[in-house]
Amino acid sequence: MKKVLNIVGARPNFMKIAPIVREMRRRKDEFLPLIVHTGQHYDEAMSDSFFRDLGIPKPDYHLEVGSHSHAVQTAKIMMAFEPIVLAEKPDWVLVVGDVNSTIACALVCAKLGVKVAHVEAGLRSRDRTMPEEINRILTDAISDLLLTTSQDADENLKAEGVTADKIKFVGNVMIDSLFYNLEKSRNSKAREDLDLIDKDYAVLTLHRPSNVDEKEVFTSLLDALILISEKIPVIFPVHPRTRGNIERFGFAERVKSSNIRLIEPLGYLDFMNLYSSAKLVLTDSGGLQEETTALSIPCLTLRENTERPITIELGTNKLVGTNTEKIKQAAFEILENSSKKDKQIPPLWDGHAAERICDALL
Ligand code: UD1
C-alpha cells in the first residue's frame, strides 16, 4: 500500500490531480491518497468551484497560504508543509505543473529524503523570466520520478543529464479530465447565459505577468483584441491579476466601449462549455494550448515562446507574440478560412494517463 500526498495549490493544478486521485481511490488495495491544498489560490471561483466540478474530495490538509511575493509564498508553503510530511511519512509526494506550490513542496521533500513524483515534467519554454520556467527546472532537478506529457519533454530532461530510468512518458492527465467531463460540460448553461447559442465568438484568457503587468505590452495586446472584436465578439473571463491591471492602467473605458465582453472567471465545466464551441481561442495560458489541441479548436498563443511545442507541431496552436498587427492578421486568417486543417491529437493524450501515472508509482 502506497501512501501518496497529492499537492494542489493553484487553478491549473486541480484538473491534473482529479483523475489521479480518482484512480488511486479506485485501486484502494494499492494506494492511500491524501490531498494537500496549499491555498495559493483561494477565491471560490479560483479554487472551490473546481473541487465541486471535478469531484475532488475535500483536502485532508489545507495550508491557507494565500497571495504574497514569490519568496514569501514559497517559504510559507514550505514551512506549513514540512510538519505534514514528517507526521504522515508518505511513500510518495506527487506534485503537478509549474506553480509555486509545485516547487515549494518538492523542495521540502528533497531535503527530507521523501520521494517526489513530478507530473508534467520536462516542459521548457527556455524563457527564464517566466516564474514557471524556474519552477519547472528546479522541480525536475530534485524529483525522483519525472512523468512526461510528450516526448519532447523526455528529450529536454535527457539533455539536462537526467537518466532514462527516472523518466516515464505517461501522456497528458489534463486531457483525462477534459474527456471525462466533456459530456457533463454540455449541460452547463454558460453559453446560454451569455446568449451565445448558435453564434460565432472568440474566447480570450490573459494573465501572464509579462503580458498584463506591463502597460506597453498590455496596450499592444488590447489594440489587437479590439480590432478582432470588431469582427467577432470576444468573451473574456478575467483573472484577478488582469482585472486589477485593467483598472490600474485606465483601460476599463476602452474595453467597455468595445466588443470584448469581460466576465468573471468561470468554473471548469462552464469554461469548457464556452471554449469547446468557440471559433477561435486567444490565450497566454499553458493548459488551454493543450485543451484546444485536444478538441481541434484554433488557438493563438499571445506569447513569444511555448513550453508545449507539440501543440504547434501536431495541434491547432500558433505562437503570435504580442505585436498588434501580427495577432490581428493571424486571427483574421482563421476567421476568414473556415476549412479545418488536418490536425492530430498528440500520442497518449487519450484519457488514460492517470492509470499510467499510478502504474509508474508502483
Ligand atoms: C499562478 C501561477 C501561474 C498560473 C496561474 C493560474 C505561480 C508562480 N504562478 O499565477 O503559473 O498560470 O496561477 O491562475 O505559481 N488572486 C485572487 N484570488 C485568488 C488567487 C489570486 O484574487 O484566488 C489575486 C491576488 O491578488 C494575487 C494575484 O491574483 O496577488 C496573482 O495570484 P498568484 O497566485 O500570485 O499568481 P497567478 O497570476 O494567479
Image (cartoon, rainbow, N blue to C red):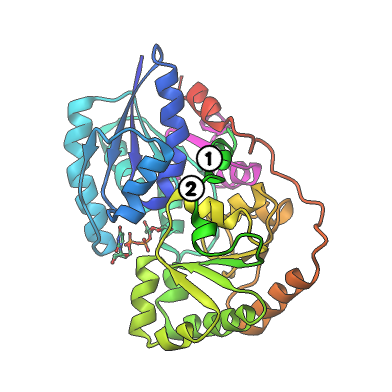
Label pair 1/2, CB-CB below 8 angstroms:
yes
What residue would you read off at disc 2? 269
Q: Is residue 304 above or below residue 296?
A: below
The image shows residue 245 at horizontal and vertical percentages of 36, 78
Q: Is residue 47 visible?
A: yes
What's drawn in magenta, residue-wise? 140-168
Please rate how many residues cluster around mark 2, counting C-alpha atoms within 10 Å: few if below 14, some from 14 to 19, many from 20.
many
Q: Secondary structure at mark 2?
A: helix
Q: Is residue 48 above or below residue 70?
A: above
Q: Is residue 87 above or below residue 190?
A: above
Q: Nearer the viewer, residue 77 or 247?
A: 247
> For residue 339, what is the image quadrant?
bottom right
The image shows residue 214 at horizontal and vertical percentages of 42, 80
**167 inside magenta stretch:** yes
User: Residue at 69% across / 73% down in the picture?
Assistant: 331
Lateral position of residue 74 relative to residue 221, left or right:
left
The image shows residue 146 at horizontal and vertical percentages of 49, 36
